[in-house]
Structure formats: C-alpha cells, structure tokens
Amino acid sequence: MSRRVGRANVAKRLAPLEGSPGRSVYADGAARFESESGTLVARPPFGLRHRAEYDVVRVGPLLEEIAEDHRVGAVLVRLGGYAVGVFEGERLVASKVGQRLVHGRHRAGGSSANRFRRRREEQARVALLAAAEVAARILAPERERLDGVALGGDRDAVRRMIELRPDLAWLDELAVERFFAVPEPRRAVLERLPYDIYAVELTE
C-alpha cells in the first residue's frame, strides 16, 4: 500500500530506526529499508542522489535529502480560476491568484444550447489565456532557477492552457511527477501546497 506523507512526519517516523538491524538499498530514486517489522520503500518527490547499500537500516541519507528546500513554481488551473506562485522551500515568494467567469453547462437542446456552448467555450478560452499570461509573467523569469514545477487543479484545463501558449511548453519539462488535483485555486490552497510538494511516497 502506498501513501504520501509530509516530510516532517517521515523524519519523525524513520529517525528512531537509524542503525537498527536490517538492510538498506538506495537506488533508482528510492530508498528501501528491510527490517524485522517489514519492508518500507520511500520515494522522495525530487528523487535521491544517494546510491548505496548498507547491512543495517540507514535512514540518514534519505532524511538529509528530503529536508533540502527547493525553488518550485506552481500553476493551479481550473476553468474560471487560477493560482500561480513561486516557493523558496515552503515560503511563497511570488504569487498571483485570479478568477474569470465561465458559465456552467447548458442542459437544454436546440440552437440556444449551441449559442450557449459557443459562449461558454469562448469564456473558457479567455479564462485560460488569462491564466497563461500570469504563468508566463511570474514563472518565465524564474525558469533557470526552478528545481521543478507543480501543476495542479484540473488536468484538462492545464493542458489546454499550455496548448494556448506554446511558449509555456517548458512547464511540462520541469513538471514534478505528481499532478496536484486541488479544489478551486485560491490563495489559501496555494499556500498549503508545499506540504504536498514535499510529501514522500511510502510503500509498505
């Protein structure tokens, strides 16, 4: 069973195991610990530089790396709302949050429904272009300094936003593996994102 755990909680759980009987393998971006209580595999969100094998439970290298802070961009987009930011570690150092009206789906049929659909599609396009403009303005100057980009919100909305602005294709190149399916992108949601960005995938 796999679950994602905040890095502070991972450290709290694993630190007491340092040096206990067992085996540790650091390889392929993950750390595998085998002990009397079972096997645990930890996969940090930014990978693992450390590669080694130990005849005891050695959690130190893992804890050192997950404690490191990174400079991370964030782009959270849903139809009608966006939140873009830059984090230095867990501190939000630049951000912009906005909303644009996009009507819900029309339930009736006929020509009025078609007009409504076209109007809704245009509203969605304008909203996504606004999100793309903010993403470009805030993140493009940071591109060379970022260790990764957290994409989230609605996957389809993020994809359409990038398609509307091909100059944002580099976001995919820097995107961390996890997609953050957050609710309505608001500042409070953005500010809570670092917990999930740094969460470690634990498999037992």
Image: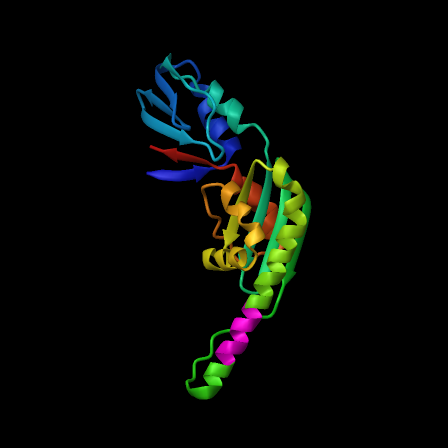
Camera-side residue: 19 or 186?
Answer: 186
Residue 102 visible within the image: no
Viewer-side residue, 26 vs 164: 164
| Count of marks, rendered view | 0
Quick one: 187 or 152, which is closer to the camera? 152
Does residue 70 appear to the left or right of 41 in the view shown?
right
Q: Residue at x 63, y 46 (%)?
A: 139
The chief SS type of the magenta part is: helix
Q: Quadrant of the C terminus?
A: top left
- Image point 55% across, 27% down: which residue? 67
Asked if residue 202 is positioned above or below residue 18 in the image, the reply reads below
Q: How is the image coloured?
A: rainbow
Q: Name the residue: 57% across, 51% down.
A: 168
Magenta extent:
116-124
Vertical placement of residue 179 versus 57, above or below: below
Q: Name which quarter of the figure residue 87 lies in.
A: top right
**Residue 7 sits inside the magenta stretch:** no
Across and down, in percent, residue 10 comes to 47, 30
* Residue 61, horizontal then vertical, whole percent: 48, 20
Vertical side of 14 occupied by 193: above or below? below
Instruction: Please state the horizontal and vertical placement of residue 17, each as a whole percent of the image.
Output: 42, 19
Q: Residue at x 49, y 27 (%)?
A: 12
**In this orientation, which residue lies closer to the viewer: 143 or 186?**
143
